[in-house]
Amino acid sequence: MKKDTFKTSILILLLGGITTKIFGFIIRILSTRILTPEGISYLTIVMPTYSLFITLSSFALPISISKMVSENKIRSKKIFFSTCFFILLLEIILIFTIFLLAPFISNTLLHQPKVYPLILAMALTLPFISITSFLKGYFLGKLKVHPNVISNFFEQIARILFILFILPKIISYGLMYGVISYILLNGLTEFISILVFMAFLPRKICLTKEDIKPNKKIIKEMLETSLPSISSRVFGNIGFFLEPIILTNFLLLCGYTSSYILKEYAAYNAYAIGLLTLPSFFIMAICQILIPEVSKYKSEQNTLMLKKRIKQALSYSFFIGIISSTFLFIFRDILLTILYKTTLGSDYIFILAPFFVLFYLEAPLSSILEAGGFAKDSFKITFFGVILKLITLSILSFCHIGLYSLVFSEIINIVFVVFLSFKALKKVIQ
């Protein structure tokens, strides 16, 4: 591997991320204004559920596939077809389960019967998301970052065109039709990404029956990496899934109205957290390149290069965290007004921003642990972090401080997870 490939790959992903993030700004502004605060509230209340579905659907494939392909122990064709078989089976089971549980989730857990069709729409997008996740992992394992950047670019272009020319016409028939179509848009854009990825696959491939046939050893090896990783992500998303449920039920018991909870949760999640996590594409770019690099040097027992890559990744992430958190803290009202034509969520950003310096270290630390073969440690940290957050949220919800119960529980979770991740990091570099 060339000396500057790590930095060059990160730079390419960052430039691509900046471009797509600019489009993301436009998309966020347009969709927020077209869908209205009511539509955004419905989207926000179901997003934790959607995040859980996406995590189950993707099954940590980018990490496991990237790791397997980068190690060069198995032919890529065998990995490709064995994983496709697994994805197909997984999606059939998952979609069937979601259709069965949708009424219970919308009516009993979220107390919002109107979001039932939104949950069904989410299920239909999952097969496209899982295939895209697999292809991203494959190309990252090959250390080819261009397909990811180009696919993201076309995704965002398609989103903008849809929101500008099609969404206003659909929403004229009713708000919920607009929200449903906005969710289904994810399936369309992921399909576009798949087409882009397919264009970068090798043209001349000699296939045998043995290549196409699902290989149990490959699936087993994939699961050995995916299961601890997916367990960590699933449990993290279960915590995110339970967040609005606990908040809604406990705040209702304390006398808060349903409309207040919807409004403030949207202000917290869509506006405050949405703004605070905008620079996270920098961190994702670092993590995408970091996983195959750590896996490669760990398998080669090249401790010197392993430490160098880890130090680079954490230094970049910490620097980005300081700059972005400071900027968002100072200019929060201006940014909220420009992006969303509101200052809702400004008070939440005021408290959260200083701690988001640490938040930007969470993903790189988790990626290092997983790529270094310590996914179980990452899962344990996530598990205890989620438990701590939910317990703290439950207790603080009865303190009559409204959504600040969620703000303070988030801060406690960030500090706890980063502290334990740094302690576990010593295992990787030994």
Image (spheres, rainbow, N blue to C red):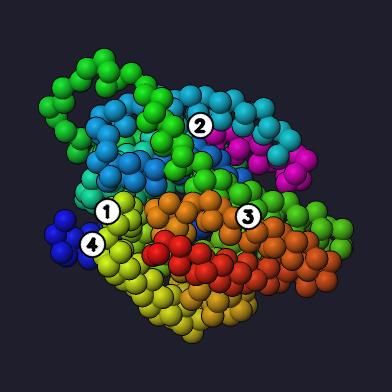
Main secondary structure of the magenta stretch? helix
Q: Label 1 amino acid? A: Glu
Q: Label 4 amino acid? A: Phe
Can you say whether 328 is above or below 383 in the image? below
SS state under label 1: loop
In this rendered view, identify the residue nearer to me: 158 or 251.
251
Q: Which mark is residue 273?
A: none
Quick check: 367 left or right of 400? left
Residue at image coords 75%, 44%: 109
Label 1, on which residue?
Answer: 300
Question: Could you say where residue 205 lies in the image, as x and y percent from the top left?
Answer: 16, 26
Q: Quadrant of residue 119?
A: top right
Quarter of the image that includes the N terminus: bottom left
- Nearer to us of marks 2 and 1 is 1
Quick check: marks 2 and 3 in contact, CB under 8 Å?
Answer: no
Local packing at callout 1 (Cα closer than 10 Å; few below 14, some 14-19, many 20+) is few
N-term-proximal mark, 3 vs 1:
1
Q: Label 3 amino acid? A: Phe
- Nearer to us of marks 2 and 4 is 4
Label 4, on which residue?
Answer: 6
In this rendered view, identify the residue nearer to me: 91 or 316.
316
N-term-proximal mark, 4 vs 1:
4
Can you say whether 397 is above or below 192 in the image? below
In this rendered view, identify the residue nearer to me: 87 or 380.
380
Label 3, on which residue?
Answer: 383
- Nearer to us of marks 3 and 1 is 1
